[in-house]
């Protein structure tokens, strides 16, 4: 790979703590799968540093996909959701059957066949759900104008976006907490913990779901405020708003299936590590095509663990590691972010209005939640459901990535807190303890005073 391959593109950045093996399961169905289905890829450029992953999308591909998908969705948006849910439920059932299997009893051929089938069924639900990435990005700079062109009054737009920018259905956390709250004895509690075992997982692997974890979520549970009567709109505008809400709903609901997949892939990977005589600590840096082919090189994986750049292209996946990847990653950062030295103002997009001043806290992983105190301004790459306790404490949220139907945007509107998304460089410019002003109405963060 060469930096010249990426210079003429405008990149949209997401980020999370994630291993290449898990990222591979997410990226292939949208890069190559979208190209086969729509003739337009949704290529992923992954820049890894140990367990942190910057996930870059090509802006022009996101726009092209959105413009191809949107006309069809405007006719019957919830039919698309219902079809996706059928695939999601099928994966859930198959996952439950696989998670209980004893892989040691399978031959190598049988294990490979099962792992490929597991991925196939996961991809059948993940690819359709991932339309939220192009559409959320597309809407973030166009949705207000689209509503205005359809005759919506400017003073009604924020109220409509507030109402339709929320999930229509409860997500897996709300469903779990509802069942947990009603559990009257230990047997029922244990059944809830087993049913929602995936809930505490993250993209670094499975975690054990405990009563203490659910008790903490109950303390921090938020309730959507009543938004009042929604302005009447034309039937054409209503369909556009329904697409907007459908995207927000998938955004809120779909992570359950991704977290299930983490547990399934973990079990397959541990078994393959034994058979390929690889340390458990290295298998997470392999790609599935390498595992299936038995083509794993321990030295290469050790280099990939330190630095790697992986391009999930429209026809194939290409990876580099070691010194080559370290230099390429530095060049990509310069290309995408430019210079962040002496920056005093960061621009993004308003996801929830308001203006606050507070102490900045940068959180890149749940291990850093302890840093957040009441009234702080939370800076992060993106938020996820496990961020809810610190979002409850924070006075405002600023994210590097995200669209107006992203998790941070939805929660900010629910909590009535200012939120600026898609800053790209917020976490790179601001340091813990800086005094910042968040003017979400204008999409601007001002650094008022740097911590000495």
Image (spheres, rainbow, N blue to C red):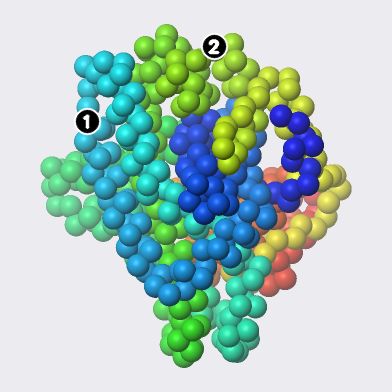
Q: Residue at x 56, y 17 (%)?
A: 301
Q: Is the residue 146 above or below the residue 170 in the image?
A: below
Q: How many marks?
A: 2
Residue 298 marker = 2
Can you tell which quarter of the image residue 2 is in?
Answer: top right
Circle 2 residues within 10 Å: few <14, some 14–19, many ≥20: some
Q: Position of residue 434 (x, y in %)?
A: 74, 50
Work out whether mark 2 precedes mark 1 in sequence or the reverse, and give the earlier one. Answer: 1
Can you tell which quarter of the image residue 417 is in?
Answer: bottom right
Can you tell which quarter of the image residue 441 is in?
Answer: bottom right
Q: Residue furthest right?
A: 342
Q: Is the residue 108 above or below the residue 150 in the image?
A: above
CB under 8 Å between callouts 2 and 1?
no
Nearer to us in this view, 420 or 169: 169
Q: Is the residue 20 above or below the residue 361 in the image?
A: above
| SS for callout 1 | loop
Residue 122 marker = none
Circle 1 residues within 10 Å: few <14, some 14–19, many ≥20: few
Would you name the residue on which mark 1 appears? 100
Nearer to us in this view, 345 or 310: 310
Q: Residue at x 74, y 64 (%)?
A: 444
Q: Residue furthest top?
A: 277
Compute the Cα span from label 2 to label 1.
29 Å
| SS for callout 2 | helix
Quadrant location of the N terminus in the rendered image = top right
Q: Residue at x 80, y 49 (%)?
A: 450
Q: Can you see residue 181?
A: yes
Q: Position of residue 282 (x, y in %)?
A: 50, 18
Q: Is residue 432 left or right of residue 304?
A: right
Q: Is residue 204 left or right of residue 314?
A: left
Q: Residue at x 29, y 29 (%)?
A: 114
Q: Position of residue 81 (x, y in %)?
A: 37, 63
């Amino acid at each position: 790979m060469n930096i010249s391959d990426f210079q003429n593109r405008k990149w949209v950045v997401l980020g999370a703590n994630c291993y290449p093996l898990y990222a591979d399961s997410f990226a292939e169905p949208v890069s190559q799968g979208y190209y086969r289905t729509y003739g337009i890829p949704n290529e992923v450029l992954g820049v890894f540093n140990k367990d942190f992953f910057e996930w870059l999308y090509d802006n022009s591909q996101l726009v092209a996909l959105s413009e191809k998908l949107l006309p069809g969705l405007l006719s019957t948006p919830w039919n698309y959701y219902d079809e996706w849910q059928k695939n999601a439920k099928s994966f859930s059932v198959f996952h439950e059957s696989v998670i209980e299997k004893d892989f040691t009893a399978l031959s190598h051929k049988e294990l490979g066949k099962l792992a490929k089938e597991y991925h196939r069924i996961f991809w059948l639900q993940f690819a359709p759900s991932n339309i939220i990435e192009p559409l959320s990005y597309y809407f973030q700079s166009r949705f207000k104008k689209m509503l205005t062109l359809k005759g919506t009054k400017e003073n009604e737009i924020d109220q409509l976006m507030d109402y339709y920018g929320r999930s229509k259905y409860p997500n897996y956390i709300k469903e779990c907490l509802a069942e947990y709250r009603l559990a009257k004895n230990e047997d029922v509690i244990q059944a809830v913990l087993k049913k929602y075992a995936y809930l505490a997982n993250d993209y670094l692997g499975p975690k054990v779901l405990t009563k203490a974890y659910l008790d903490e979520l109950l303390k921090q549970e938020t309730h959507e405020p009543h938004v009042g009567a929604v302005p009447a709109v034309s039937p054409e505008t209503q369909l556009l708003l329904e697409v907007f809400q459908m995207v927000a709903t998938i955004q809120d609901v779909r992570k359950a299936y991704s977290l299930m997949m983490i547990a399934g892939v973990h079990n397959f990977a541990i078994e393959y590590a034994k058979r390929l005589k690889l340390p458990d600590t290295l298998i997470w840096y392999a790609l599935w095509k390498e595992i299936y082919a038995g083509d794993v090189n321990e030295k290469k994986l050790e280099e990939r663990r330190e630095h790697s750049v992986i391009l999930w292209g429209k026809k194939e996946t290409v990876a580099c590691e070691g010194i080559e990847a370290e230099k390429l990653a530095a060049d990509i950062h310069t290309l995408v972010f430019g210079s962040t030295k002496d920056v005093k103002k960061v621009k993004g997009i308003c996801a929830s209005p308001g203006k606050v001043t507070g102490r900045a806290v940068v959180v890149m992983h749940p291990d850093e939640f302890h840093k957040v105190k009441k009234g702080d301004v939370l800076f992060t790459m993106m938020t996820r459901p496990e961020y809810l306790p610190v979002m409850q404490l924070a006075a405002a949220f600023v994210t590097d990535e995200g669209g107006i139907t992203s998790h941070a945007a939805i929660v900010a509107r629910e909590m009535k807190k200012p939120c600026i998304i898609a800053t790209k460089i917020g976490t790179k410019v601001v340091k813990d303890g800086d005094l910042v002003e968040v003017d979400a109405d204008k999409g601007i963060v001002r650094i008022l005073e740097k911590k000495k």
